Image (spheres, grey):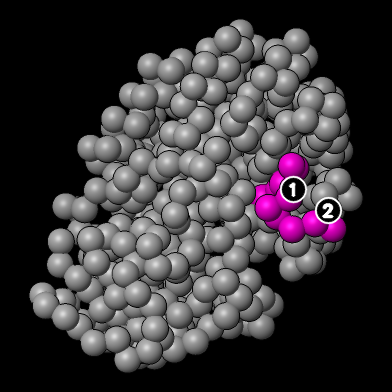
Amino acid sequence: MYSKLIKGATVVNEGVSRIQDVLVKNGRIERIGSNIQPVGNCTEINGEGLHLLPGAIDDQVHFREPGLTHKATIGTEARAAVAGGVTTFMEMPNTNPAALTQELLEDKYAIAAATSVANYSFFMGVSNSNADEVLRTNEKKKDVCGVKIFMGSSTGDMLVDNYVTLNRIFSGSELLIATHCEDERVINANKEKYADADHASYHPLIRDVNACFESSFSAIQLAKQCGTRLHILHISTAKELQLFSNMMPLADKRITSEVCVHHLHFTADDYAQYGNLIKCNPAIKAAENKAALWEALLDDRLDIIATDHAPHTWEEKQLPYQKAPSGVPLVQHSLLLMLQYVKDGRISIEKVVEKMCHAPAQCFNIAQRGYLREGYHADMVLVDMRGGTTVSKENILYKCGWSPFEGHSFPARVHMTFVNGEVVYENGRVNDVVRGERLRFER
C-alpha cells in the first residue's frame, strides 16, 4: 500500500483546529505534524483550504439486507455513507430474517465483508424468546458492537415486552445494550384516539412525548437496577432530557444517549411540506422539543449525533399515512447538515467532530478509530467549507433514490473520504474496489 501525505489541511481533532500535515502509511496514521516531507513512493494530497476530520461513525443505521433489498443493501448504503464522510456504521438487526441467532448475525458480517466500502459492525437482535442466544454474544464481545432491544413498536418478532426476558438480558449482557424506547401501551391508546388519522401530522400525536418518556424511564430504571451499560437511541423529546446527565465525562457514563440529525433539523410544522417523507419512529415532534435537543447536545446531556438511516422506496412512502412505513434515508447528508449548522453559528466544527466521531468511538469502545491519532486507522474525510452541495437525484446514492433534502443546497462539500488509508470517495466518485473492515472493540 502506498503512503499518502495530506499537506496543509486544517486538522480538526480533540477540540482543536490547526493547520497540519498528516502522513498515512499501510492504512494507519503514521505522523501528524508540520512540514512533513514525503519519503519514497508517496502520493501528496493538497489539503490547503480544506478541513480534515476523522471519518464520521454512525451508530444507528438500517441497511435492509438481507430480505429487504428492494429498499437498500449493505453495499449501496455503504457507498452513500462514504460519499457523505461516514466511514463506519453500526447496523440494526430488524432485517428479514431478523438477526436473532448467532448464525444470522454472522451472515450479515459476511455480506459486509464482500460488499461494504465502509467499516462495519452489526447489533445482535432481541425477541421475547431468544435470551439464551443473545447472551451467547458475550463470547464475542470484542467483535460485536452491542445488543439492540426494541422496547416499543417494531415489526415481526422484535418487540420486547416480556420483563423476564428484559431482566435476563439487562442483567447478563456484557455488551452495550442499545434501546429504541417507545411505550406500546401509550401508542396503542393514541391509535384508538386518532383512529381516523389520515396525514403524517398525526404521527407525533400517536407516537407522543409520553410514549417516549415512559419507555426511556423504564429502561433507565432497569439499567440502574441491573448495572447495565445502556445506550438510548434517537432521543426526540424535551421531557426525556431530564433523564440524562452532563455531570461526568462520557468515559464514566453507564447510561448514554443519542440524538439524530432529523430531530435536530425538522419539527412537526414540516409535516405540511414533507408528509410521509419525514414519518419516522420516534416521531419528529413540536418545535420546543427541537430547541431542547439542541441545548442538551451542546451541554453534553446528549452524547452522540447519528442518523437512524432507514430507507423505503418512493412508492412505499406515497401510500396513505397509516400504511406508509416509517423511516428516512439520511446517512449521505448527515455530516453536511451538521456542517451547515457550523456555518450558521449554531455549533462549532470541533463539537460536530466530538459528537459524530470521537463520542461514538468512546461510547462503544471502538479500537483505534474515531480520532486523528498516530497509530490509528486512517479513517478521514476532507471537507471544503467554502464549497457547496446541491442534492439532486443524480447525486443521491441511496438505493431508494430519494432524500427529503432533494433540491437543498448545503454550504459545504465532501471532497475526499479515506477508509483505512484508501481513497474511497473523491469528487463524486466511489472507489468500489475498497473494502471496509469489521470493527473491533476494547472490552
Task: Determine which residue is flagged by label 1.
Answer: 253
Report the front residue among 211 and 132.
132
Vertical arrangement, residue 57 with respect to residue 101, above or below: below
- Residue 77 image point, x, y percent: 36, 47
Q: Residue at x 38, y 62 (%)?
A: 375
The reply to whether residue 29 is in sight is yes
Residue type at the position of mark 1 = Lys
Q: Is residue 353 left or right of residue 118?
A: right
Mark 1 Cα within 10 Å, few/some/many (few <14, many 20+)?
Answer: some
Residue type at the position of mark 2 = Ser
Q: Is residue 254 magenta?
A: yes
Vertical arrangement, residue 223 with respect to residue 26, above or below: above
Q: Are marks 1 and 2 in contact (CB under 8 Å)?
A: yes
The answer to which of marks 1 and 2 sits earlier in the sequence is 2
Query: CA gap, disc 1 to disc 2?
Result: 9 Å
- Residue 96 image point, x, y percent: 42, 22
Q: Residue at x 44, y 67 (%)?
A: 373
Q: Which mark is residue 245?
A: 2
Q: Residue at x 51, y 42 (%)?
A: 442
**Residue numbers of the magenta segment:** 247-261
Vertical arrangement, residue 426 with respect to residue 220, above or below: below
Q: Is residue 383 left or right of residue 254?
A: left
Q: Residue at x 66, y 76 (%)?
A: 347
- Residue 381 image point, x, y percent: 38, 69
Could you say whether the residue bearing mark 2 is in a helix, strand or loop? loop
- Residue 419 image point, x, y percent: 31, 58
The reply to whether residue 320 is in sight is no
